[in-house]
């Protein structure tokens, strides 16, 4: 389980660092002159919406992994790690770029704050993290408690990292630029998946 948690931690940090997860909130906050506290609050709301859709999908896959492991004992020791490796290779060689749609934020007009927050949250909810789903499937083979632990790790790390990035960028670190990371995110994601999958062959989940 340790390698799954480590992989989920790395993938959550990498995923949260992609600018289109936090830059739209920052752009709206600056355009509407929100204080940092409000910007962070909206970041938490948008991040929670993103995590919610990801976790709902992950629950289904985790349940699938649980049922497969109960019927086929080899799924836990062989099939789950192999699946991580295969999906990791697919990600690594599927080209550069990020899988989520970019959120373009143009000039922001003064409008009800609730509508702005709802729009940001809806956009994030409709773009769940697909890369982490393989970890949920693998964690499901160990049972509900391990699946819940993995999901909690993803939730805390993702929202925490997004909030930290908004805070750092908001306070005036102009040179803070992670846009180049999106070009290589698939390779980094693939590497994490492959490493965790390979470790699964040698270490008990």
Image (tube, grey):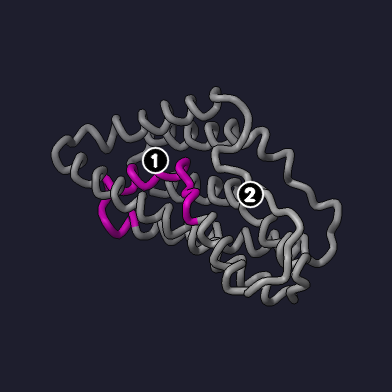
* The image quarter in which residue 98 lies: top right
Can residue 201 be seen from the camera position used here? Answer: no
**Residue 129 vertical position relative to residue 37 in the rendered view, above or below:** above
Residue range corresponding to the magenta coloring:
125-147
What residue is rendered at 55% in x and 42% in y?
100
Give above or below for 120 relative to 101: below
Task: Describe residue 125's horizontal placement relative to residue 168 as left or right.
Answer: left
Which secondary structure lies at badge 1? helix
Q: Is residue 13 magenta?
A: no
Q: Can you say whether 123 is above or below 164 in the image? A: above
Q: Is residue 89 visible?
A: yes
Q: Residue at x 55, y 57 (%)?
A: 158
The answer for how far apart the CA atoms under marks 1 and 2 are is: 25 Å
Query: Would you name the residue on which mark 1 appears?
Result: 134
Picture coordinates of residue 103 (x, y %)? 63, 49
Compared to 165, does 205 lie above or below? Answer: above
């Amino acid at each position: 389980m340790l390698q799954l948690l480590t992989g989920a931690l790395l993938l959550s940090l990498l995923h949260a660092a992609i600018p289109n997860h936090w830059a739209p909130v920052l752009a709206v906050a600056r355009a509407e002159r929100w204080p940092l506290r409000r910007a962070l609050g909206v970041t938490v709301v948008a991040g929670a919406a993103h995590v919610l859709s990801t976790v709902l999908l992950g629950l289904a896959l985790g349940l699938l992994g649980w049922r497969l492991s109960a019927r086929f004992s080899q799924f836990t020791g062989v099939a789950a790690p192999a699946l991580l490796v295969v999906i990791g290779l697919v990600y690594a060689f599927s080209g550069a770029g990020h899988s989520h749609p970019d959120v373009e934020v143009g000039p922001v007009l003064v409008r009800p704050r609730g509508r702005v927050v709802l729009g940001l949250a809806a956009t994030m909810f409709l773009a769940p993290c697909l890369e982490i789903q393989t970890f949920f499937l693998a964690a499901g083979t160990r049972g509900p408690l391990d699946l819940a632990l993995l999901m909690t790790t993803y939730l805390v790390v993702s929202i925490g990292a997004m909030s930290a990035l908004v805070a750092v960028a908001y306070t005036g670190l102009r040179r803070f630029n992670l846009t180049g990371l999106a070009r290589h995110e698939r390779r980094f994601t693939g590497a994490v998946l492959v490493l965790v999958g390979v470790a699964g062959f040698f270490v008990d989940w």
